[in-house]
Image (cartoon, grey):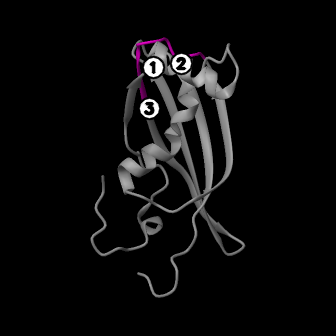
Amino acid sequence: MTDNPQGLDPYLFLEIGEQLGHLEYAITPEQLQLFREAVEFPEASFPNIAAKEYAEVLVRKHCHIPVISAKHQDHYLRPPKLLKRVQVTGWVREKYQRRGRRWLVVETFAVDEDGTEVLRSQHTFMVPAPQQGTP
Protein backbone atom coordinates (compact mmCIF):
# COMPACT_ATOMS: atom_id res chain seq x y z
CA MET A 1 0.00 0.00 0.00
CA THR A 2 1.36 3.43 -0.88
CA ASP A 3 1.99 5.69 2.08
CA ASN A 4 0.90 9.30 2.01
CA PRO A 5 2.75 10.86 4.98
CA GLN A 6 1.99 14.48 4.07
CA GLY A 7 -1.74 13.81 3.68
CA LEU A 8 -1.63 15.02 0.07
CA ASP A 9 -4.55 14.56 -2.28
CA PRO A 10 -4.18 10.94 -3.54
CA TYR A 11 -6.02 11.75 -6.78
CA LEU A 12 -2.99 13.76 -7.86
CA PHE A 13 -0.78 10.66 -7.73
CA LEU A 14 -3.01 8.36 -9.82
CA GLU A 15 -1.73 7.74 -13.33
CA ILE A 16 -3.65 6.43 -16.35
CA GLY A 17 -2.58 2.85 -17.03
CA GLU A 18 -1.27 2.40 -13.50
CA GLN A 19 -1.53 -1.14 -12.17
CA LEU A 20 -3.48 -1.31 -8.92
CA GLY A 21 -3.35 -3.78 -6.03
CA HIS A 22 -3.79 -7.53 -6.29
CA LEU A 23 -6.61 -9.44 -4.61
CA GLU A 24 -6.91 -13.21 -4.26
CA TYR A 25 -9.59 -15.37 -2.68
CA ALA A 26 -11.51 -18.62 -3.02
CA ILE A 27 -15.28 -18.96 -2.77
CA THR A 28 -16.47 -21.60 -0.34
CA PRO A 29 -19.81 -23.41 -0.52
CA GLU A 30 -20.82 -21.59 2.68
CA GLN A 31 -20.10 -18.17 1.15
CA LEU A 32 -22.08 -19.08 -1.95
CA GLN A 33 -25.04 -20.16 0.17
CA LEU A 34 -24.88 -17.02 2.30
CA PHE A 35 -24.80 -14.86 -0.84
CA ARG A 36 -27.78 -16.71 -2.34
CA GLU A 37 -29.77 -16.17 0.85
CA ALA A 38 -28.80 -12.49 1.02
CA VAL A 39 -29.95 -11.77 -2.53
CA GLU A 40 -32.93 -14.11 -2.20
CA PHE A 41 -31.99 -15.89 -5.42
CA PRO A 42 -31.23 -19.62 -4.96
CA GLU A 43 -29.53 -19.93 -8.37
CA ALA A 44 -27.19 -16.93 -7.95
CA SER A 45 -23.72 -17.93 -9.05
CA PHE A 46 -21.47 -14.85 -8.78
CA PRO A 47 -20.91 -14.21 -5.05
CA ASN A 48 -17.72 -12.32 -5.88
CA ILE A 49 -19.85 -9.31 -6.92
CA ALA A 50 -20.36 -8.66 -3.21
CA ALA A 51 -16.59 -8.22 -2.77
CA LYS A 52 -16.44 -4.78 -4.41
CA GLU A 53 -13.20 -5.83 -6.08
CA TYR A 54 -12.96 -2.57 -8.02
CA ALA A 55 -12.65 -0.57 -4.79
CA GLU A 56 -10.41 -3.07 -3.02
CA VAL A 57 -7.66 -3.03 -5.68
CA LEU A 58 -7.63 0.79 -5.49
CA VAL A 59 -7.37 0.81 -1.69
CA ARG A 60 -4.61 -1.80 -1.71
CA LYS A 61 -2.46 0.50 -3.81
CA HIS A 62 -3.36 4.01 -2.59
CA CYS A 63 -4.94 3.69 0.85
CA HIS A 64 -8.41 5.14 1.24
CA ILE A 65 -9.49 7.60 -1.44
CA PRO A 66 -12.88 9.19 -0.82
CA VAL A 67 -14.98 8.44 -3.89
CA ILE A 68 -18.62 8.54 -4.94
CA SER A 69 -19.75 5.72 -7.18
CA ALA A 70 -21.20 7.03 -10.44
CA LYS A 71 -21.33 4.10 -12.88
CA HIS A 72 -20.58 0.39 -12.79
CA GLN A 73 -20.47 -2.08 -15.66
CA ASP A 74 -19.88 -5.79 -15.08
CA HIS A 75 -19.38 -8.51 -17.66
CA TYR A 76 -19.98 -11.92 -16.10
CA LEU A 77 -18.15 -14.44 -18.21
CA ARG A 78 -18.20 -17.63 -16.18
CA PRO A 79 -19.21 -18.33 -12.58
CA PRO A 80 -16.21 -18.92 -10.32
CA LYS A 81 -15.67 -22.56 -9.39
CA LEU A 82 -16.02 -23.33 -5.71
CA LEU A 83 -12.76 -23.56 -3.77
CA LYS A 84 -10.69 -22.48 -6.79
CA ARG A 85 -8.48 -19.45 -6.31
CA VAL A 86 -9.74 -16.28 -7.98
CA GLN A 87 -7.16 -13.59 -8.71
CA VAL A 88 -8.21 -10.00 -9.32
CA THR A 89 -6.14 -7.17 -10.67
CA GLY A 90 -7.03 -3.73 -11.90
CA TRP A 91 -5.70 -0.53 -13.35
CA VAL A 92 -6.58 3.11 -13.76
CA ARG A 93 -8.31 3.28 -17.13
CA GLU A 94 -9.08 7.02 -17.17
CA LYS A 95 -8.68 10.09 -15.01
CA TYR A 96 -10.19 13.38 -16.10
CA GLN A 97 -11.96 16.55 -15.04
CA ARG A 98 -15.26 17.68 -16.48
CA ARG A 99 -17.58 20.51 -15.39
CA GLY A 100 -15.48 21.16 -12.32
CA ARG A 101 -15.59 17.57 -11.11
CA ARG A 102 -12.82 14.99 -10.96
CA TRP A 103 -13.46 11.52 -12.34
CA LEU A 104 -11.65 8.21 -12.07
CA VAL A 105 -12.34 5.05 -14.06
CA VAL A 106 -11.01 1.77 -12.66
CA GLU A 107 -11.12 -1.45 -14.66
CA THR A 108 -10.68 -4.88 -13.08
CA PHE A 109 -10.67 -8.44 -14.23
CA ALA A 110 -10.77 -11.71 -12.35
CA VAL A 111 -9.40 -15.07 -13.46
CA ASP A 112 -9.58 -18.42 -11.74
CA GLU A 113 -6.51 -20.52 -10.99
CA ASP A 114 -6.90 -22.26 -14.36
CA GLY A 115 -6.52 -18.88 -16.09
CA THR A 116 -10.14 -18.63 -17.22
CA GLU A 117 -11.56 -15.12 -17.05
CA VAL A 118 -14.49 -14.98 -14.65
CA LEU A 119 -15.47 -11.32 -14.47
CA ARG A 120 -14.49 -7.99 -16.01
CA SER A 121 -15.72 -4.72 -14.57
CA GLN A 122 -15.38 -1.01 -15.11
CA HIS A 123 -16.29 1.43 -12.38
CA THR A 124 -16.49 5.21 -12.63
CA PHE A 125 -16.01 7.27 -9.49
CA MET A 126 -16.37 10.95 -8.78
CA VAL A 127 -13.48 12.03 -6.57
CA PRO A 128 -14.37 15.05 -4.44
CA ALA A 129 -11.74 17.75 -4.12
CA PRO A 130 -10.18 18.05 -0.68
CA GLN A 131 -12.05 20.31 1.73
CA GLN A 132 -10.61 23.75 2.31
CA GLY A 133 -8.25 23.78 5.24
CA THR A 134 -6.96 20.27 4.49
CA PRO A 135 -3.92 19.48 2.38
**Residue type indicated by callout 1:** Ile
Q: Mark 2: which secondary structure?
A: helix
**Magenta part of the chain:** 78-87
- Asked whether the residues under the numbered discs 3 and 1 touch, taking CB atoms below 8 Å apart as contact, a structural biologist would say no
Mark 3 or 1: in front is 1
Judge left or right: residue 135 versus residue 40.
left
As rendered, which of 97 and 7 lies closer to the eye? 7
Q: Residue 32, labelled with which disc?
A: 2
Query: Residue shown at 43%/72% (left/top)?
Result: 9
Q: Calculate the distance from the C-alpha at mark 2 to the C-alpha at mark 1.
A: 7 Å
Query: Residue shown at 47%/17% (left/top)?
Result: 30
Q: Calculate the distance from the C-alpha at mark 3 to the C-alpha at mark 1.
A: 13 Å
Q: Which residue is mark 3?
A: 88
Residue 89 in picture, x, y percent from top left? 43, 36
Dominant secondary structure (helix, strand or loop) of the stretch shown in magenta = loop
Query: Residue shown at 56%/34% (left/top)?
Result: 50
**Residue type indicated by callout 3:** Val
Q: Who comes first in sequence, dot 2 or dot 3?
A: 2
Judge left or right: residue 77 versus residue 89.
right
Q: Mark 1: which secondary structure?
A: loop
- Asked whether the residues under the numbered discs 2 and 1 touch, taking CB atoms below 8 Å apart as contact, a structural biologist would say yes
Q: Who comes first in sequence, dot 3 or dot 1?
A: 1
Q: Is residue 72 magenta?
A: no
Q: Which residue is mark 1?
A: 27
